[in-house]
């Protein structure tokens, strides 16, 4: 088993304590002091040294380490230091932390400004980084386990009940399903019901199904009532009589429908309709015969019209093309005429020039070379005029050719214009002829034979209309009788449907009642399963609580709580002699219960560490515990911290002579009146009170 013991603890400028050294040397110590003298500060320093938190789990940012002046203001510039020397098994380790302010000179400023805090870490006087420091401590013990084993109130006051419960089951071991079933034979049925589900999962299934069944059971009476309310009154109805009446009415209706058909399809009316149909066919045949020859002529003329229109479009296309060519030739002729005029002007300009020795060249503008003769000038002039005449002849020849082509095109355009007009006239004539043929096609109406057929048709139609009008009253009368019969049949069918509706409603009610029985039976099965699961939990509760409580001397644990509805709820409540830890248990009992828990947890984790017991004055007899203890005792007699180590106290193994000597030194008179242990207790009390011995002999 690993064990940590505190050899020495030094505080400097820590939460108001300027200088303090505690040197238990691995022994138990008692720290006396009035309220506010710094007992809790010692515990805070110990936990801060190891875990950066005080004894109440507050981090450095949440509790004030720094020393304050009389006005409560922070005294700046101090270093706040805690040093602890530990014995870890047989090895000695020193841990030190220094918390100090950080002052930085800002750029452009002559003074330093406070910019936060830093913490320096040391192991065996060697500076280390925070990570290395924390890793070294975690190698010794996990923080959560350390708090469990060093603070008697941590388990019951700092942990959530679920965490406490988890730790207890981890330490003492859970109870298996097999253990529970072996304890109660009635629970053997449960193993078949659970299948692959856990007990908790099956309970959820049961509660879910019970809830659904309850909802369904609540709805069934409402549904039955709704069905009953919807049932019509059929007390005065007889289904057989209704069927018989319906059959009789249907037969009467068939007879009326036959009579109606005979009226509508009477012999005289049919004969007139046949004659009328024949006349209409004869008229249509006459119209077709009369119009067929004319329609053939119209089709022929339409073909001629389309041919003429096609020829017109061709002439029109050629006409437009010729007109465009004329415009192009006119433009070319104009250009040629402009060029001929320019040549003519140029010829006259050269022809008018006379010889002059200094005459500039009419072509390049340079003066003739000095000494040029008249003959050379005239030769040059004649050559120029000849060239102009030659160009003029070529342009004139081209102009005459273009003019001839233009004249030919203009003649062609005139001819095409005449053809275009001829085609337009021809098309108009064909169109006029077609219109006359169409008018002629409608002239059949004036034909005597056609008019006679029309008169005969109208006479037959009039006779048929008169006959139809006369029988319409008979038709309406029969149709009215048929409608009355149908209404009577529908009324009887409604009555028949009411009987059917009542029958269906009764069947539905029986279905709902059967469903209600089935749901009730299923609910009973679920109730039985729920009882078994709860009985399982109760049995497990007894076994688990018995198993866990057997591990502790003082503490007892209530792990389950029975609900009003008979169910069982998981809890974790610590008690002592039946009194709950959190309500009614005095401080002394709470401390001893906490120490009892530490004893068991230490065995489980194989670890011992110094235990800080706050309010130790509340305990008259501290539970036996095999670990170093630091007792923090409220004592109004000590206005400053007073520390008593185990070696300072007297043990009851001393002989009588030693006791007499101690009694004399501490002014304990009449020691013979005390029993030995009472005398030891009295002497130790004086030591704890720090009373100076009066060196006088006992008479």
Image (tube, rainbow, N blue to C red):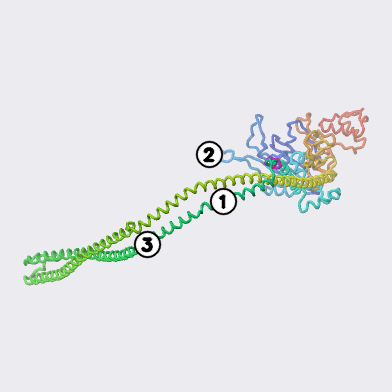
Disc number for residue 49 = none
First-in-chain label (2 vs 3): 2
- Report the disc number at residue 257: 1
The image quarter containing residue 643 is top right
Q: Which residue is mark 2?
A: 109
**Mark 3, secondary structure of its residue:** helix
| Helix, strand or loop for disc 1 | helix
Q: CA distance from mark 1 to mark 2?
A: 120 Å
Q: Is residue 336 left or right of residue 427?
A: left
Whole-angstrom CA distance, mark 3 to mark 1, is: 43 Å
| In the image, farthest residue toward the top | 699
Q: Is residue 228 magenta?
A: yes
Direction from residue 218 to residue 314 in the image, left or right:
left
Camera-side mark, 3 or 1? 1
Dividing the picture into quadrants, the one containing residue 38 is: top right
Q: Which-is-in-front pick, marks 1 and 2?
A: 1
Taking depth in this image into account, of 314 and 636 the one nearest to the observer is 314
Q: Is residue 432 shown left or right of residue 241?
A: left
- Residue at 93%, 35% (x, y): give it: 656
Q: How many marks?
A: 3
- Callout 3: 10 Å neighbours few (<14), some, many (20+)? few
The secondary structure making up most of the magenta span is: helix
Location of residue 636 with respect to 560 vertically, above or below: above
The reply to whether callout 1 and callout 2 are in contact (CB within 8 Å) is no
Q: Secondary structure at mark 2?
A: loop
Q: Judge whether 385 appears above or below 85 on screen.
A: below
The segment highlighted magenta reads 222-230
Label 3: which residue? 288
Q: From mark 2 to mark 3, how far is it between C-alphas?
A: 122 Å
Furthest toward the front, the residue is 268
The one nearer the camera, 318 or 378, is 318
Asked if residue 643 is positioned above or below residue 329 in the image, the reply reads above
């Amino acid at each position: 088993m690993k064990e940590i013991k505190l050899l020495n603890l030094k505080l400097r400028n820590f939460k108001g304590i300027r200088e303090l050294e505690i040197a238990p040397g691995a022994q138990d110590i008692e720290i006396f002091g009035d309220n506010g003298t710094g007992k809790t500060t010692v515990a805070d320093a110990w936990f801060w040294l190891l875990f950066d938190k005080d004894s109440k789990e507050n981090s450095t940012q949440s509790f004030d380490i720094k020393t304050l002046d009389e006005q409560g203001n922070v005294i700046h510039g101090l270093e706040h230091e805690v040093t602890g020397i530990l014995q870890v098994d047989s090895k000695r380790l020193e841990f030190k932390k220094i918390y100090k302010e950080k002052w930085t000179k800002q750029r452009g400023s002559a003074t330093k400004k406070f910019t936060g805090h830093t913490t320096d870490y040391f192991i065996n006087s060697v500076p280390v980084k925070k990570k290395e420091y924390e890793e070294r401590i975690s190698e010794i013990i996990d923080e959560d386990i350390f708090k469990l084993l060093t603070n008697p109130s941590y388990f019951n006051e700092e942990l959530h009940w679920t965490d406490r419960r988890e730790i207890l089951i981890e330490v003492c071991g859970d109870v298996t399903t097999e253990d529970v079933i072996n304890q109660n034979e009635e629970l053997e049925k449960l193993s078949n019901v659970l299948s692959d589900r856990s007990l908790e999962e099956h309970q959820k299934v049961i509660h879910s199904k019970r809830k659904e069944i309850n909802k369904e059971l609540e709805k069934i009476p409402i549904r039955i009532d709704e069905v009953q309310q919807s049932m019509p009154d059929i007390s005065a109805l007889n289904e057989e009589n209704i069927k018989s009446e319906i059959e009789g009415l249907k037969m009467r209706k068939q007879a009326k429908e036959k009579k109606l058909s005979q009226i509508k399809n009477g012999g005289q009316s049919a004969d007139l309709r046949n004659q009328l149909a024949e006349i209409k066919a004869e008229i249509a045949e006459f119209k077709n015969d009369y119009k067929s020859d004319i329609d053939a002529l119209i089709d022929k003329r339409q073909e001629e019209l389309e041919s003429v229109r096609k020829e017109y479009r061709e002439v029109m296309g050629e006409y437009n093309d010729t007109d465009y060519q004329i415009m192009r030739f006119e433009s070319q002729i104009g250009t040629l005429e402009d060029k001929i005029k320019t040549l003519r002007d140029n010829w006259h300009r050269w022809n008018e020039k006379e010889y002059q020795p200094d005459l500039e060249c009419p072509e390049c503008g340079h003066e003739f070379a000095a000494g040029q003769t008249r003959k050379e000038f005239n030769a040059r002039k004649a050559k120029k005029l000849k060239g102009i005449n030659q160009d003029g002849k070529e342009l004139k020849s081209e102009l005459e050719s273009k003019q001839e082509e233009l004249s030919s095109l203009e003649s062609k355009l005139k001819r095409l214009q005449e053809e275009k007009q001829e085609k337009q006239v021809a098309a108009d004539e064909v169109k006029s002829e077609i219109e006359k043929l169409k008018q002629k096609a409608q002239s059949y109406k004036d034909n005597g034979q056609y008019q006679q057929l029309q008169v005969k048709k109208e006479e037959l139609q009039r006779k048929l209309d008169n006959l139809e009008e006369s029988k319409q009253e008979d038709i309406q009368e029969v149709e009215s009788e048929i409608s009355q019969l149908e209404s009577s049949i529908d009324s009887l069918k409604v009555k028949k449907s009411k009987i059917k509706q009542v029958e269906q409603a009764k069947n539905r009610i029986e279905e709902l009642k059967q469903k209600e029985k089935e749901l009730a039976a299923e609910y009973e099965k679920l109730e039985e399963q729920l009882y078994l699961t709860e009985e399982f939990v109760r049995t497990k509760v007894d076994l688990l609580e018995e198993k866990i409580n057997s591990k502790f001397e003082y503490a007892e644990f209530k792990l389950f709580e029975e609900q009003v509805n008979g169910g069982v709820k998981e809890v974790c409540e610590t008690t002592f002699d039946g009194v709950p830890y959190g309500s009614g248990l005095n401080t002394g009992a709470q401390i001893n219960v906490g120490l009892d828990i530490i004893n068991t947890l230490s065995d489980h984790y194989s670890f011992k560490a110094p235990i800080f017991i706050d309010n130790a004055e509340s305990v008259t007899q501290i539970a036996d515990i095999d670990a170093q203890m630091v007792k923090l005792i409220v004592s109004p007699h000590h206005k400053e911290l007073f520390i008593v180590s185990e070696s300072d106290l007297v043990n009851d193994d001393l002989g009588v002579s030693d006791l007499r000597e101690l009694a004399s030194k501490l002014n304990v008179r009449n020691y013979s009146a005390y029993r030995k242990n009472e005398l030891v207790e009295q002497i130790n009390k004086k030591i704890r009170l720090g009373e100076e011995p009066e060196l006088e002999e006992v008479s």
